[in-house]
Image (spheres, helix red, strand yellow):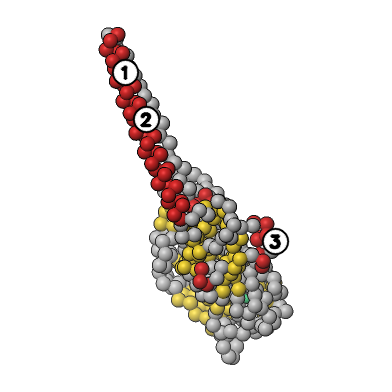
Amino acid sequence: MSITYNGASSPPVKVTLMHPNGNVTDEDSVDEYFVDTVFQSVNIMLEGIAAVGKYDLTVINTVTGSRKIQITATSYTVEEASYPHRSGAKWRSNEIKPPEKQALYVAVTKGYNPVINARVIAYIDRPSSTTAFELVVSDNGAGADVNKDDGIYSAFVTDYTQDGRYSVSVTVDNEGVDTTIATDSLVGRGAARIKASKGRAAQESTGDFQRITNGGTFTLSSYDENTNYYPPNDVMDLLVTSIDKVAKTVTLEWTAPGADLDVGNASRYDIITSENFTALTLDPESQTLVNESEVIEGDLNAPLPSGSLEHYVVKILMKEDSSASTIVWITLRAHDDRGGVSVISNLVSATFKNFPEEEEKEEDETKLGMILGITFGVLAALIIAAIVIYCLCKSSGTSQEVTTTMEMKQADEESPAYDNPIYKP
Ligand SMILES: [Ca+2]
Ligand SMILES: [Ca+2]
């Protein structure tokens, strides 16, 4: 158990722990009670198997005036074979000078396996604020998080108040979500899959659990509250989920960034399209910006909160003189409300045939007629061949077996997903 307090030059708080069996741990318990004046914490460590029941903790303030404290308790299983759910939090850096980026990483594990889809909330104590700032920490592969569903939950931290020391405690639980243990992967290994342990399903429910962990502190310096240090983070998971070739629309999905990296709300999106890949990557400014009127679902001026799944249906305008088959490249960027703008996202593409609708329909009807004609022709030929063979067999008086093999090949249906370079089945 760890009790941290503020006031480096003041005497530490005094702590008394009453055990269920009547034992007491206090500052006189030299084997169990440790004071760390550097990290400003009182630590109680109970060796062996702790008594089951209710513990009473008393913390006495040793200075006049109010004092901020933070309490963390950690327990360990007595059964070696049964690993508990664990969570551990870590800052990317111990010292930050904006615009350096600070991120919080929280590992949620059971043994070596990641616990996925947990609810992870960080409470960040800031120097001049009495209320902790709340931050959702995600394992969604967007923003600060590198790999989705690897048990490492991540978030950027940008909501500073002033220079000084920032500390964090993290709550991990399964409240309102279907949290599972991925027994077929290792924590921090991204999408890499291993064999699930013998006799275990690849995904096991965690059941109800809650863990609270202390992520330590970092120091912020040279911060100026009037500077917009952080634009929205770059979207890296833009995806074309479907294409309507007749209506010339694409459905796009991506994870919403925030106003400051992955914190808060962005204020606007630019969706940019081009039939020229090189021009789009080198000079996105000169390419086509999708207008509000071409957005059938979604609102370019109302991005969802960071981490939400955005879903847009957008009309694609093509050049009049486009060739019969046209590849349209699509990217996007996000703005915040203080002039910050992300760099462009990953690029995706959609392929369109530029035939007028009637012509395409007429052509389809002609094709259908041809296919039916050929099919009936083939059937008639087969019947005639069968009659001829039957007659031959009958006339020769010997028994012969005739086998006709027909290979049916399904037409290659164009899946919209094939148009998308980042699609992985
Ligand atoms: Ca992750
Ligand atoms: Ca910003």
Please give the residue where the numbered disc 1 appears in the rendered image: 388
Q: Is mark 1 on a helix, strand or loop?
A: helix
Q: What element carries label 2?
A: helix
Q: Is mark 3 on a helix, strand or loop?
A: helix
Looking at the rendering, which quadrant does residue 165 occupy? bottom right
Count neighbours of disc 1 (C-alpha within 10 A) and say few if under 14, some if 14 to 19, many if 20 or more: few
Label 2 to label 3, Cα distance in Å? 55 Å
> On the rendered structure, is 114 left or right of 200?
right
Label 3 to label 1, Cα distance in Å? 69 Å
Task: Nearest to the eye among marks 2 and 3: give it.
Answer: 2
Amino acid type at image mark 1: Val
Task: Nearest to the eye among marks 3 and 1: give it.
Answer: 1
Q: Nearer the viewer, residue 245 or 222?
A: 245
Please give the residue where the numbered disc 3 appears in the rendered image: 282
Please give the residue where the numbered disc 2 appears in the rendered image: 378
Count neighbours of disc 2 (C-alpha within 10 A) and say few if under 14, some if 14 to 19, many if 20 or more: few
Residue 181, can we see it?
Answer: no
Q: Residue sitting at 61 percent across and 60 percent down?
A: 274
